[in-house]
Amino acid sequence: MSFLKKLKDKFQATDQQEEVSDKYKEGLSKTRKSFSEKINDLVARYRKVDEDFFEDLEEVLIAADVGVTTVMELIEELEMEVKRQNIKDTNEVKQVISEKLVEIYQGNDDGSEETSLNIQKDDLTVILFVGVNGVGKTTTIGKLAHQLKSEGKDVLLTAGDTFRAGAIEQLSEWGKRAGVDVIKHSEGSDPAAVIYDGIQAAKSRNADVLLCDTAGRLQNKVNLMNELAKVKRVIEREVPNAPHEVLLVLDATTGQNALSQAKTFSQATDVSGIVLTKLDGTAKGGIVLAIRNELGTPVKLVGLGEKITDLQAFDPNAFVYGLFADLLEEE
Amino acid sequence: MAFEGLADRLQNTIKKIKGKGKVTEQDVKEMTREVRLALLEADVNFKVVKDFIKKIKERAIGEEVMESLTPGQQVIKVVQEELTNLMGGDESKIAVADKSPTVIMMVGLQGAGKTTTTGKLANLLRKKYNRKPLLAAADVYRPAAIDQLETLGKQLDMPVYSEGTDANPVDIASKAVEHAKEEHLDYVLIDTAGRLHVDNELMDELIQIKQNVNPDEVFLVVDSMTGQDAVNVAESFNEQLDVSGVVLTKLDGDTRGGAALSIKAVTEKPIKFAGMGEKLDEIEVFHPERMASRILGMGDVLSLIEKAQENVDENKAKELEEKMRSASFTLDDFLEQMGQMKNMGPLDELVDMIPGANKMKGLKNVDFDEKQITHVEAIIQSMTSKERQDPSVINAGRRKRIARGSGRSVSEVNRLLKQFEEMKKMMKQMTNTQQGKKGKKGKKSKGFNFPFM
């Protein structure tokens, strides 16, 4: 059985999975079109696998924001593979390309890695959100709060962004929409103190999940990164084993700088997972490849639209399927 | 991690060429490949890169580079020239309408920084051009977007026109302009909601606003960290709204900002302003040639100098430059500089502008805490003048005395002395770099590569 068929079967095993992959297909339709269309174009244009072919392929991948380093490695591996299998027909290469890309998405371990959120069964779960300005931290928290609440969890929010004008009001509005309480101080107060109060409130109310918002900050601002490390220390001190998740929110339209963000934020706060937002715009998704390849940090959630329900658990299989659906259906 | 600059990238190729009598076409090809990678790593769109490389190759294969004694340097020069060309020559001004008020519309994706930029621009208009702006809150979709603009208005003590979230953005914009006329305000800045360029419904709304208020400027606000997609975004907004200029935000981060080049190449619209920080006065007129250097990873010496000129008196600056060059920089100068530097803005920002600074081992990890500056001042002030002139005389006993005198620990005194040495080293290298001195090969200090040769 061909590799692509196997992948396809994997998805169509149950109806539920079908539904999930449809959602991805829909959200990623633009990504998928531009990306796999380009690969198809490429394959159609070249009959022979030669240097020019690889150069064009390189461009296709780079255009999808796959990091330069990742692309170079990939191309090198592909060239080796092509030589080894003695492939001359570009149509055959298509499969090798897909295989290699899936390999990077899933890592070597067959995609068994945990991508669901680490939510405690009986105890308080503290989740800290970090990221640069304007990536969608507050919006993500609002969406996640709604989701957890509808799962029957007792959710509390903390407005740790005391810097940006209107940030506290924004979180409060999301709190109202999701029907959960928000612990807040006034603008300009110490974020660590707000988070501390949030934890105390969560403890005394016996809340299940505490979502902590923080101000957006560029990763090269040492002072602000130290402030973030302090916030994390406060959480560590007040709740054993917390924060259970430190989620780095990344804007999917971000280019190579996303890697720098992931690296620096990890140094300050031990990022445990990534939320990839705004994935419903045009061409991207390549960034996930780069992050997986160079950092190993798993993507846990993806934002696929503006609606409160448009935050999805990241499913690497469905994601890959969404990207390659065109290729699969052709066979 | 900072990406390698073009200069570093070209190192290997140049090493190979050195010692060869002549530069071959193959060498040029290798060099242009490095240029290509450097640009791609800086997020310049691959199509833009392709055209660009073609141009570079033509010039490089010509006499200019191949006949030159310093081909590496020549390539960088050619690249920078072409890049500056492409980026657009003159700095552009902001429009003034014949009939007040002048209307400016801010558009862009979600999270690009439209609201903050609106506030900053208004502040700039008042401060620099002595205008009276009105802020109009037409983002009725994002929760608390209006609150955000109102808070900014309060901070700036500026009027904000809003009608809450139930009103129609098109009406809000038109009424805001009316309101400005009545109140004799001469600028109206319309903050619109962030939207995807492929969201037709919301894009239509912008087109309607534009038809109704007939703005003098439509500014596309773009996050400087945007990747390859910047081209699609800019193209789409420009097609539908015919933007008049671009504002780049978050340029105080460590992104190369290749998006700037992509946008310019695709839309041919000038980039007019750059957001450089979180505070409301941190917006600057965009400088194309500096952006060219930045994309290539060559530091931003010009901005640094300009910043210094704004805040430091010129004679002193000259003196400092001389001292930096001759490496006769003492702790006394350091103390004085620190006072002036504090006026220039956050230190980490300044260091970022120095070419090669991110490569400096000592500097990379220095914690630029403003409080620490006070400590450093205390330590230096506890030294005798002899010690300040020549730190090498400071032995263990003196260190203890200084620590006691300043109320800091001995280890802090040690750290300061070490950092000072590093700094001196860095200054020497920096000035060398600027001059691009030849004939110094083999004497490279650790952790730093001369960009040229």
Image: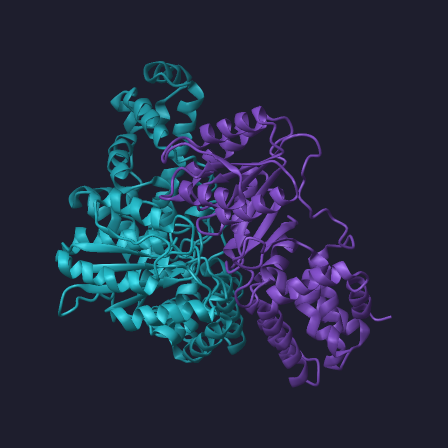
Quarter of the image that includes the C terminus of chain A: bottom right
Vertical order, A42 against B297 (above or below):
below
Where does the image place residue B389, in percent across and percent down from the top left? 28, 28
Q: Please state which of residues B69 and A270 is positioned toward the viewer in this rendering.
A: A270
Where does the image place residue B241, in percent across and percent down from the top left? 35, 73
Left or right: residue B364 versus residue B172 is: right
**Chain letter, purple in picture:** A
Where does the image place residue A269, in percent across and percent down from the top left? 55, 37
Where does the image place residue B204, in percent across and percent down from the top left? 40, 71
Q: Please state which of residues B223 and A302 is positioned toward the viewer in this rendering.
A: A302
Residue at horizontal 36 percent and vertical 34 percent from the top: A188
Left or right: residue B168 versus residue A199 is: left
**Chain letter, cyan in picture:** B
Asked if residue B144 shows in the view, the reply is: yes
Residue at horizontal 29 percent and vertical 53 percent from the top: B162
Residue sitting farthest toward the front? B166
